[in-house]
Amino acid sequence: MEFLKKVYRRVRYSLIFRGILHIMAMNSPHDYLSKIFYRMRGTKIGKNVGIAHGVFIEESRPHLVTIEDGVNIGPRAIIVAHDSSYHCINPKIPILAGKVIIRKNAYIGAGAIILPGVTIGERSIVAAGAVVTKDIPPGVIVAGIPARVIKTVNEGLCKFKD
């Protein structure tokens, strides 16, 4: 019985500690600190990643989120790796979980929502406020609810050329 109490305390304090790290990561004044706290929670974050203020990265299963090199995430974006909606209605249905991978040099706009099991392709742009429910191919711009491809990144870059 004493062993179970020790295990319970360890798990409980671990959850409290992870919760504190999550709050600190979301509210850090600089993305350098956010990345430290998110990494401490188990999120895999590459080099030269920018994370704006208020970004929510999976609270209970942060180890399922991978953010590769050169990614930028706008303010108040949400990345979730689990879905407990059906489980709340019927506890016999398991909580669904899926890895979220954001490939190199992708951009996630302000307020975008990335749902479980989604991969954002390399050099892709997710517009502000978009809700990503499916994998996004490399080199495209997506927008809307649910997010849909609106053009390629190269097409978008054409308007900036001389």
Image (cartoon, grey):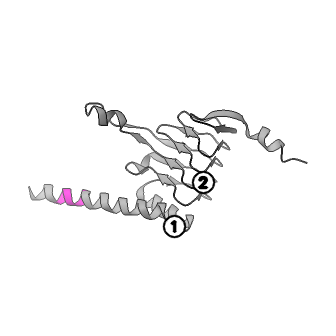
138 is within the stretch colored magenta: no
Kindly identify the residue that appears in the image at 83 percent across and 44 percent down.
159
Q: CA distance from mark 1 to mark 2?
A: 16 Å
Q: Which residue is mark 2?
A: 74
Number of numbered discs on residues: 2
Look at the numbered disc 2 and give the secondary structure of its residue.
Answer: loop
Q: Residue furthest toward the left? A: 1
Residue neighbourhood size for the residue with mark 1, other residues' Cα within 10 Å, grouped as few (<14), some (14–19), many (≥20): some
Asked if residue 70 is positioned above or below residue 136 in the image, the reply reads below
Asked if residue 153 is positioned above or below residue 69 in the image, the reply reads above
Type of the residue with mark 2: Gly
Q: Earlier in the sequence, mark 1 or mark 2?
A: 1
Residue neighbourhood size for the residue with mark 2, other residues' Cα within 10 Å, grouped as few (<14), some (14–19), many (≥20): many
Asked if residue 162 is positioned above or below residue 16 in the image, the reply reads above
State the extent of the magenta-drawn residues as a range: 6-11
- 128 relative to 151 in the view: left or right: left
Kindly identify the residue that appears in the image at 55 percent across and 66 percent down.
32
On the image, the x and y values in percent for residue 21 come to: 40, 62
Asked if residue 121 is positioned above or below residue 67 in the image, the reply reads above
Camera-nearest residue between 82 and 138 = 82
Q: Which residue is mark 1?
A: 33
Q: Mark 1 and 2 residues: CB-CB less than 8 Å, in contact?
A: no
On the image, the x and y values in percent for residue 79 come to: 49, 47
Camera-nearest residue between 92 and 123 = 92
What predominant SS class does the magenta segment belong to? helix
Type of the residue with mark 1: Leu
Kindly identify the residue that appears in the image at 34 percent across and 32 percent down.
86
- 86 relative to 134 in the view: left or right: left
> Which numbered marker is on residue 110?
none
